[in-house]
Image (cartoon, rainbow, N blue to C red):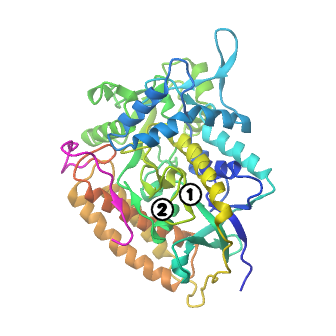
Amino acid sequence: MSDQPHYDVLIIGSGAAGLSLALRLPNTARIAILAKTTFLDSNTFHAQGGISAVLNEHDTVESHIQDTLIAGAGLCDESIVQLVVAQGRACINWLRQQGMPFTQVLDTQGVSQLHLTREGGHTHRRVAHAADATGQALADTLLQKVREQAHIALFEKHHVIDLITTGKTGQPGQRVLGAYVLNAAANRFTTFRAKTVVLATGGASKVYLYTSNPDVATGDGIALAWRAGCPVVNMEFFQFHPTCLYHPQARSFLISEAVRGEGGRLLLPDGTPFMQNFDPRGELAPRDIVARAIDHEIKRLGIDCVYLDISHKPRDFILSHFPTIHRHCLQFNIDITRQPIPVVPAAHYTCGGVKTDAKGRTALAGLYAVGETAWTGLHGANRMASNSLLECLVFAKQAAEDIVACLPQIPSAAVLPDWDESQVTDSDEEVVVTHNWHEIRQFMWDYVGIVRTNKRLERALHRAELLKQEIAEYYGNFKVTSDLLELRNLVIVAELAIRCAMQRKESRGLHYTLDYPAQDDTLPPQNTILYPDR
């Protein structure tokens, strides 16, 4: 029996949710944080916009609640919305105490205060930010604080294979006991024992061919929880960010919604604005409306992209507000102070996820899910801009409080069976992984994208089921690699998204189908819940 490290709390993922949860726990708890690649390779790190909170004297908590409910198209859990929004100011203050370098401005009396920007769906300026690289500043700040804590162990390039539960080990009850982990750097396996496990692995937008997300966003936490017996909710609601840089040499790069919040205009190639034809809020309509409008114009005109123009603003204004975007676009000879930016929609955010309660608890005892991995009820059918980082912070706090209360009653896990790879061999067909990976992302983009139909979804499900069988066979015969683990998780995410989309017989929020183009208001809106045993 090999060495099995044992912790009170095993946190899988190193974005805002995972890092802030670790910092909220007492230093008497033994904590481990696992990162699949590096600690800064997360959706958090790539977030540009900011964190929404009521910080302006002209704003109100009730206004933030109503904006969120409207964006969520009837599917938000109002009690969760109230819970999250009410803690906004406290979360911003907590981050400032950790050293978060929010952008400041001088008020009319010369006093420094937070600069607040406005994004789509918000009726007030309430987005605190660090220029246009809020996520990077947030990740750097939290990671620095975590590294200072002697009770927190950090493991990079540790890829979770599966959760270990009492059911899998023949023990009584239904509880998580730890996880099997591939140490990718050393190419060996470790069995991590833990009293409590937290899934903070981010979203799943890498299931689409075009995405603003980093390569790590493969829905690992959702797939891990699903295989462990946890239900998932509303996986049909993938948010497509309306404006990602379109350039043949550029990997997906997000053009922050704050560009539109500060007056950026969406234009056709001939310079004609078009958003007023789709929504009276124009460029500040919620993301699903803007993304569908752009998709409609691209298909209607047979063009490659539309354009986002902020060049009418003063050069100094642009450089101070959007230095990262300006610098990145210059690499492709696009000067945003003088030229419009070519943009297209791309998969951006997973509104569905592992079903949790107000404390981040899943259906499996001892297992929590926080951040984009989780479905909390906050976002409903469409996430409002900059509510995601706020959700990470609030539910990290909620989960930490519950973990602290529960830890004394949880016995230490007994020694667990180690990972067994004695019956598998090295693969001589790595091309299978590469091919299947691409096929999943291609059919998801073609058939389960911004606009869907019953026929497209049926085709997608057929392909997903065939690939799932093929991947399972491959997984059973060959040694696991990080690419294979991601592929195995990705096909589960694809199937869950398709099955949820097929169950929704209406268009609502981020789910738009030509077969049911209207929202069904004859009955109260329902969440789409899938259970592993059904």
* Residue 306, numbered label: none
Q: Residue furthest front?
A: 409
What is the crowding at mark 2: few (fewer than 14 residues within 10 Å), some, or many (at least 20)? many
In magenta, the rendered stretch is 513-534
Q: Which residue type does callout 1 highlight? A: Thr
Q: State yes or no: discs 2 and 1 in contact (Cβ < 8 Å).
A: yes
Residue designated by label 1: 201
- Residue at image point 41% right, 31% down: 67
Report helix, strand or loop for mark 1. Answer: loop
Left or right for 127, reference 148: left
The one nearer the camera, 359 or 35, is 359
Quadrant including the C terminus: bottom left
Nearer to the camera, 366 or 513: 366
Residue carrying label 2: 222
Question: Does the magenta segment cover residue 187?
Answer: no
Earlier along the polypeptide chain: callout 2 or callout 1? 1
